[in-house]
Structure formats: C-alpha cells, structure tokens
Image: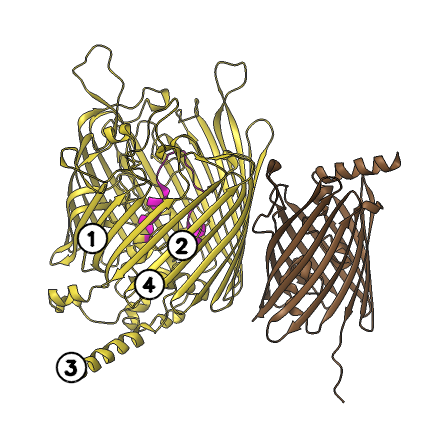
Amino acid sequence: MRSRFWLVFLILGLKQFVAAQEVARPPIDVELMVQELFAQQDDENAIAYEDLYENLLQYYRQPLDLNRASREELRSLWLLSEGQISALLQHIQDNGRLISLYELQTIPGFDLLSIRRLLPFVTVQTLGQIGQRTWQERLKNADTHTLLLRYDRTLQQRRGYTPPEGRSMTRYLGSPDKYLLRYRLSQPKDFSFGVTAEKDAGEAFTWNPGQRQYGFDFLSAHAQLYDRGAFKTIALGDYQLQFGQGLLLSSGLGVGKGSETITTIRRSQLGIRPHTSSLESNFFRGGAATHRWRGLESTLFLSSRRVDASLGEDLAEDTTLFTLGGLQTSGLHRTPTELANRQRAREQVLGGNITYRNPSQTYSIGLTAVHTAFNLTLQQRTEPYNLFAFSGTRNTAVGLHYSYLWQNLNFFGESARSGNGGLGTVNGVLVSLSEKVEVALVYRYYARNFQTLYGAAFGEGSPNQNESGLYTGVKLKLGNRWQLTGYYDRFSFPWLRYRIDAPSSGEEYLLRLQFMPSKTTLLYGQYQYERKARNESIAGEPLSQVTETNAHRFLLLLDVSPLPSLRLRSRVQASQFQQSGPARTGYFTAQDASWEYNYTRLSARYALFDIDDYDTRIYAPEQDVPYAFSIPAFSGRGTHVYLLAQQRLTRSLDFWVKLSHTHYRGQSTVSTGLEQINGPRRTDVRVQARYRF
Amino acid sequence: MQHLLRVSLLLILLFCSFPGKGQINNAAVGSRAIGLGGAAVTLPDLWALSNNPAGMAALKEPALGAYAHNRFSLKELTTVGLLAVLPSSRWGTVGLDVQRFGGEYYNEQRLGIGLAHQLGVVRLGLKADLLQVRVKEWGSRKAVALSLGGQSELVPGLTFGAHIYNLNQAKLAEFQDERVPTVMKMGLSYQASTKVLLVAEAEKELEHPVAMKGGIEYQVLPALTLRTGFNSGTRAGTAGVEVSFKQFQVAYAVGAQHQLGLSNYLSVGYVLQKREQP
C-alpha cells in the first residue's frame, strides 16, 4: 500500500517535471535587464535604488500568464511593442489560448529576439479555472510558497562600530549584520500572503514596544485576494498603488529614461500590488479594494502608518507649535538621531480611483483622488529651493488620466492638481510606425508648486515638481541582427533646485547600437550625453555661480555563451565630466564568467577601474543573489572582484553565497564618516537561503 | 659620462609613465604582436603564451620560439626570451617561457608556465609567472603574478579576446605600495579576407590611462606577411615583416616613437612537425 502511494507520488512528480520541461524558463538576467531598462542612476535624490530595484524584481519574478494577461499587464512588462501586444491579443482571440510558448513564433511581429527577451517573464497555462478547486487545494498548490533568509556583512570594521572617540562620539547602536526574512505564499491572480522583516546594518535588535520596536527594525505583512466575485483585488496590510501615469500614485516601479527608449516611458496601471520588498518608504499600510462592474473599476484605499521625520528648526516665538523637518525615506535607524526620527509622524491617506475601460481595452479614462494628512506640521528646511515644497498638515490632490489606442498609436496622459493649486501634466504617444520603426513622444509640465507625495511620473527630477520637458525616443530594427535605439530629452527647471541656485535647463541624449550575430551572442555600444546646470563655487567669490556641466558616458558590452554551460561577458565603460576647468574621466573594464552545471551555478567578475572623482563615477550592475540587487558606484582606482555561488541542496532548498572585494590603490581609507574603513579594502559577504515548501 | 646619462635616462624611463610601460608589465611579445601595435589579445599563436595564454590552445603541434627586443637602441632596454608550447590531448596545451630584461644595474627575470584549453569555440588560458626584479646594490624581489585569458570566435572571422595579467596584484615592495602592474586587455580581430586581418584592442593598466591599439596584417604571398599598427599608450607607430620557410617563421618589427627613436624586434618561431610513421 505504502509503496503504491510512493509510486503514484513519483509518477505525479515526473509528470510535473515533464510538463515543466516544455520551454525551459531561463533565469532572469538582472544585470542585462538593468542595462536595458534603466538609465544611469542619479543620486541627486537619495532614493535607495537597491530597494527600488528589488521591488521591480519582485514584480518580475511572478511570470505573467500570456493566456490571461490583459493589455495593461502586457504593457507593464516593458518588453513588447504596442503592435506586438495587439497581434498577440488578436491571435488569442482568433485561435484560442496559446498551447505552448513555441506558438509565439507564429504571431506576426514576434521575432526571435523579442521572444527570447520575453521568455523569462512569461508562462502559458492552458488549465481551466482555478476557482473550481477548493481553498485547501489552492493553498497547497500555490505557485510560490517560499521562505527566504538573507544575511549581509562588511568584513572590515567601519568607524560606526568602533568605540567612541575623537570629535564625533556618535556610533551605531547595533551590529554590522544585516538580516532579511521573507515569507511568501502566492498564486498569480488568486491570492498573495507575505511577511517581510529586516534589520539593516547598524540597527539594533530590540524589543521595545514603547518605541514600537519589535525585534527587527522593519516589519511588513500583506494579504491580498484577487478575483473574488465583483472584487478584482482586496488588500490588507502593506500595499502599493499605481494608477494612470503615476503622477499621484506610483509605487516604486518608476522606470525612466534608459536604453529601452519606447516602452518604459509609459506607466501602466497596475492598481493595488502587495508591498513585499524591504523598501521602508513609499508604501501604504491599511486596506484597499478594487471593485469591478462591467468596464468600470473603482478602487478605494485607506492607509495609516507612522513615518520617519526629522525635527524641524525651532520657531522664533511660538513655542507651542511643533514642526517637523522633512520626511525621511532612507529607512535607516542606526544612530540615536536616526532612531529619534523613527516613526515620529503619523501619515494618513485616503483616496480612490475610478477607471473606465471599454471591453476591447483600447481606451480608458480615470479619475484619482488622494488626501493625505499628517498629525504634525511638516516644514521643509528653509532654503530657497524648498520654497514650493510641501509644508503643512494636509494635501488633497485630484488627477485625471487617459489612454487611447487608435491603430498603432497609443495616446496616454495624466493631469493633476495638488492641494495648493499646483498643476502637473504628462502626456505622450507611442507609435509603431511599422514593424521596424517605433517612436515615442512625451511632454511633461510640472509646475514649481505642484506637490505630489507618492508620484513618480516620467521626468528628469524625482519629485514631479518644477520641471517641463519634451522627450523623443526611437527604436529601429535594422534587419534581424541589428537594432538602433535612441532618445533625446530636453528639460528646464523654472525654479531653483538642490545645488542649483538659479532656474536652469538641460538636455540629454542616448544612442545604442545593438548587434546580435547569433542566438547566443550580443554585442552593443552605447553613448549617452547629459548637459545640466550646477552650482560652482569660485575661489574668492562669496556666491556660487550656476554653470553648466557636461557628462559623456560610453558603454561597450559583449555577451557570449560559447557553450550551453558557460557564459562570458566583457564590458568597457568610460565617462567624462566637465564643469568649468579640466575634464575628468573615468574608465571601468570588467570580465565576467558564469558557469552552470546541474544544480550549481558560479559567477565571477574581475574588474579594473580608474575613475577621477565622484562626478565621473561609473555604475556597473552585477549579478547578485535572487531578489537582491547591486549596482555599485565606482570612483577612485582599484580592482573589484566578486564570486557568486548557487547550490541547490535539496529539491526545496537553495543556497547562495556572494563575496565581493574591492581593493583601492593609493588611498588609505574607504568611504567617509561613520562608514569609513581604515585600509584600502572593502569585502562584503552575502548569504541567502531559500526554502520552497 | 655617457654611461651615467644612459642610466639616468633609464631611470626616467622606468619611473615616467608611458615609456615605462615596457616591463614587469606584460609587454607584447613576438614581432607579430609588436608589428600590430601590440594588439595581440585575440591572436592564436605561439607568442600567445605571453600575450594571452588562451591563444596557444589553437596550436596543433609543439612549437618553440625565441625573441630579442631592443628599445630605442639602448642596450639596457633589451628583452630576450624563449618559449615552448606543447599541445597534449590530456592536459590541454602547456607552455613554458623565460624572459630577461635589462642590464647590469636593473634587470627583470620571468619564468612562466601556462595552460590552455579549447572548449567548443572558446579558448581559455591560465598562466603563472614568477617575476624577479634586481636592482644592483638594492637587492632583488620576487613575486608571482597570475593571469587569465579567453578568446572566442563570435561569428566566423570575428574573434574576441580578453586577458587579465596579474589578477592577484602581486606586491613588490611595501614602499609606496609598489605592485606589479595589473593589466586588463580586451580586443576584437576581424579576418576581413584570407589575406587581411584587422585587430583592435583596449588595454588598461590599473595605474595608467587606457591605451588603444590597432593593426593590419596583410599576407602578400603565402610566405610573406606585412604588418602595421599603432599604440596610443606608447605613442608609437609600428611596422613589421614576416617570412616563413619550412618550419620556421622569422619576423622583424620596428617601432617608431617620436621622442625616443626606433625600437627593433626580432623573433623566430619553429614548429615541430610530427614525423610520419613509416
């Protein structure tokens, strides 16, 4: 009896295995993806990019079922042109559900290159309704049921962990270890439950309910159900929202200008999504639901959570009024000051969205309203560039968004008005002129007093404020092997900005020529130019001047897989930066190799860099453990090496180790302030284990 | 007096950035490489043992080589070396080389052993060099430098090569953190026709600006090859000629540097042919 049970189990297991063999879903190549989708980072606005990307990765990890994907969802992959999406939907409508991913080759407009790009992110499921199964069954057979543990540490001692001495006595309160725990149980289009807990390096593990500290510094949980009767989504706990073009509500998926010049400039309406990353800002905590009635989708959400804020300056006479400085988004609580700022204010958000879509999803129109209230008065630092920044306790913003598809032209846009009367609008059109030519145009205008607290619509600056600009992008498929992409963007800032003490303007363009001589080889070269203004202090002059900066960036990348188990990647990156005075340059070159055998995967990089200063810094994305992300920024001179190993220990347990080491030449310390390391080296270790139930 | 001048010039060369690129650094070896401006990272030949060990995996027969390089007609700036490469079915291709540079007052020795494998369309190579620097009256230092190289044919005719020399950043002295240069080269070669080969390469030495190199090789007759190239790092133009007869290849190259004058390179390669079994 028992053996028979095992036999059945074995057969079932084998069957599953065979089914999964259909088209092997290649692993997501994060490094190439980043290189493709994103432009150069800019830490003008200190957003934790790592968390932002992690968020994006989370989104990508759940493969999209092509058979059940809506136009909106297909757009949100950023991989398909409007023409391809229409062709795919038409194909499904005419011939019924796709039986296999191989069928994609028969759809007009789907060339091998785009299919290969698409494969890691999609699946084809021909099974019937999941709703027919019972709850227990569905929970048991959830697509994702994992527990993930990650540990990070920098091996060298940083100043923040040494005993206090010298001028600054401030030290970190916790250990230099970073822990992340993530549990997730989910089934696409059915349900998602998850818990995330994180402790950053330098934060302390404490149980102090009075200070709202419960062990881990950051705790997050979510529960979401999809397609329950008339409700499309019901969310409890932590969630994110993205509506329209993201002018009012955009949840960490703001891909901007990059070498993908067409699809990434349009935001897609993803609605309510679970917040699963460890990003400690830009999410909502409470409840949200989307109701569907015919073509009308209405969303209502309510959020109340404590946010980090620094204490403002004392007011001159009125001492009864308590003001806050600015909201803080780093999510780091390592020093007494950071800890004091932790969860200082309460933020309450109430809002909703109504969107109407016609049955064939060719047009949509919607209205978004967001009301935010803080329990304390928010007051930005009194700097001229902050003159139009949000201050006060409440803000109500209302916006209208639309999308319209006519032939191969997709018009889209959103306009909004913030509580103080500031206006913002972003409008664009994507055109598939032919299978070989695609064009995108976006115009945005964000008044200097437009205030959006959760928005991240298309733009140069990261708050959508004080900016206007016109973007033009093209993509040319020059035959099967060659592709040329490029964009030109012109922008101006009518008011002052951080480190720019005058109204200013700038421009940026990029060109990338891509060559794919064979299925396993990719070669491309990219050039990017940016002109922007910035303060410059001149010796002997009391006021700094605003002058122009010119930045050039070059990238050459060769990716080749000579054997199925071996992948080699070489890159050369160079940068040049000039304000007034001599130009400074940077050069980075790296050789990567990754090797895969059965359940083992090894990747390594050796890199040399020689970069004059921080302005010429070079960002080089690298491989990392799944769900994590690293794009280190290099400046100085030295070598950088990393080794990443993955080993599947059992059917359900995977294990990763990453070691990265940077050795600087001609410098005796690395980093500054509390992060300073004595000596020219920095070594980081990252260990991750994933258990699949 | 003249001797003093020579020695001071030598010291200037050694401590001044660009001509100093000569040694301890893995300067290109073999007159073929030199004739092509030093752009040798993609070349599959005997000299690859020193230029990019991956390249020697392309050899079918054992081969021997000898070379003498003289820079700017100064006796003290002479490099001489010997190489031996042995392809074996079991171990891959094994190579051994020795090199000596310098004169009585300053000299460098190198003993290298390399190993290369052909995997499909990829050639991978590994090399360890034992380096010794001797400065008269200062004593000598030893260091081991590890190198890795790869070559791959992307599409027929188009070859990519990459090489990292001294990836372990071997240290020569504590004083000013003196290390053996770490050098990374990447390049492409394109066999435009059976007679014409184009090469291009970017070489980055950690502590010096990147150098661009390029060259053209033209096979006039089956036995006669002409070459020319440039190197932005040494700011030199080069030219070369190679004659092959029987199992010998004799190549000569000349490099012209505007300020310092001419350099001469001579190398001889010899391929051992398997004897026909009677």
Instruction: Inspect the image, locate mark 1, and give the three-letter code of the amino acid beneath it.
Output: Gly
Kindly state the secondary structure of the residue where label 3 is placed.
Answer: helix
- Residue depicted at 30% across the width and 74% down the height: A17
Same chain assignment for discs 2 and 4: yes
First of labels 4, 1 by sequence position: 4
Instruction: Inspect the image, locate mark 3, and give the three-letter code of the amino acid beneath it.
Output: Arg
Please state if B127 lies on the left or on the right of A160 as rendered: right
Where in the figure is residue A55, as x and y percent of width and height? 31, 48
Q: Is residue B207 above or below residue A376?
A: below
Disc ID at residue A122? 4
Q: Is residue A254 visible?
A: no
Instruction: Inspect the image, locate mark 2, and give the three-letter code of the amino acid beneath it.
Output: Val
Instruction: Chain letter for mark 3, please.
Output: A
- Residue depicted at 36% across the width and 33% down the height: A160
First of labels 3, 4 by sequence position: 3
Q: Is residue A306 above or below residue A513?
A: above
Q: Colour of chain B?
A: brown
Tell me the yellow chain: A
First of labels 3, 1 by sequence position: 3
Separation of residues labelled 4 and 1 (CA atoms): 22 Å
Label 3 Cα crowd, 10 Å radius (few <14 / some 14-19 / many 20+): few
Separation of residues labelled 3 and 1 (CA atoms): 35 Å
Disc ID at residue A30? 2
Residue closest to the eye, B203 or A117: B203
- Residue depicted at 52% across the width and 14% down the height: A541
The magenta stretch spans residue A56: yes
For mark 1, what is the residue? A194
Separation of residues labelled 2 and 4 (CA atoms): 16 Å
